[in-house]
Image (cartoon, rainbow, N blue to C red):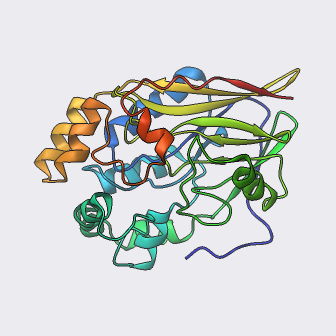
Amino acid sequence: MNEPSPCWPLIRADGPVLVFGGPYSNLHATQALWAEAERLGIPPSRTICTGDVVAYGAHPAETVALVRAWGIPVVAGNVEESLGAGADDCGCGFAEGTACDLASVRWYRHADRALGRGERAWMRDLPGRIDLEVGGKRLAVVHGAPSAVNRFLFPSAGDGELAAEIALTGCDGVVAGHSGIPFTRIVDGRVWHNAGVVGMPADDGTPEVWFSLLVPEAGGLRLEHRRLSYDWRAAQAAMRAADLPEGYAAALGTGIWPSDDILPPMERSVRGMRWEPESILLG
C-alpha cells in the first residue's frame, strides 16, 4: 500500500489543467477524453488522473496501457493499491454484503486475471497524492480523501467534514475522485473539488461522463466541470461480451447506477436528475 510521504510529487502549471477520475477499465471513454484533451490543447504534463484506472469495465489491461502511453500523472486509487499488492478485493469501501460489494467480486476478478506483473509494478509506484500549483493556489490531488484512499465524500458532506480533510493537507484545497459525482464546495476560503469520473455516468440519468478544467485567471482559479460524450454503446457491448455485471453495463446507457448503497439521503433523493454543477472562481 502507498505510505504517507513527507514530499509528494509537485506539478507547477502555467496554464489550464485537466483533471479526471475513474477510467474504470472503460477504454472507449478514456480514448474520448484523450482526444478532448488534445482538442483543448492541454498537454499530458497538465492532465491528472485521480486514480481507479481499473474497475467495472471490460478493458483493464488496455485502459492501463492507454493511460501509460498518454504519459499523464496518476494518483493511486484504492483499486491500484489492491491490485498492486495482490489483495483479494478492490478495497473500495463498500459495506460487506451490499449489492456493490457483491458485484465487485466479478469485475475485480476480471481485472485481476487481465493484468500482469508490469501493470502491477506500475500501480505500486503511483503516488498516493500529487500537489498541484496553479492560479496562485496549491491543491492536494488525492483519490478519495486525505484521511483514507477509499473514503466517500459526496455533495451533501458537511462543511466540517470537508474542512477537516482539507486541513490535513496544508494546502488551499483538495481535488478528489472516488465518489463518482462531480461537485465543488468552498469552505472557509478553501476548496473541495471532485472532478467526477469518466468510466461511469454520475447517476444523473444521462450517459455522459465528467472531467474538470482548472483555469488560472486574473481573479484567481476557475474550477469548471465539463461533460464528455463517448461511444457508450461500444463500451456497454464489450462489458456484456465479457460477462461483467449487467447492472453496471446498463448504467452506461441509462446513467443510473445499479445500486444506491453508498449514497447519503440527499443524493438518493435526486437520483436520475441531471447534474448541473456550477463553475466556481476561487479568489
**103 vs 5, nearest the viewer:** 103
Q: Is residue 197 visible?
A: no
Name the residue rendered at 35%, 55% in the picture.
55
- Residue 158 appears at what percent x and percent y? 67, 48
- Residue 11 appears at what percent x and percent y? 75, 48
Name the residue rendered at 58%, 22% in the picture.
40
128 lies above or below 238: below
**159 vs 37, nearest the viewer:** 159
**Residue 218 falls left or right of residue 76:** right
- Residue 63 appears at what percent x and percent y? 37, 49
Looking at the figure, which quarter contains the C terminus? top right
204 lies above or below 24: above
Q: Where, by quadrant of the figure, is residue 95 drawn?
A: bottom left
**Residue 135 falls left or right of residue 207:** right
- Residue 226 appears at what percent x and percent y? 54, 25
**240 vs 193, nearest the viewer:** 193
**189 vs 200, nearest the viewer:** 189
Q: Where, by quadrant of the figure, is residue 282 drawn?
A: top right
106 lies above or below 24: below
**Residue 106 falls left or right of residue 17:** left
Name the residue rendered at 28%, 50% in the picture.
59
**Residue 180 falls left or right of residue 154:** left
Looking at the figure, which quarter contains the N terminus? bottom right
Q: Is residue 100 visible?
A: yes
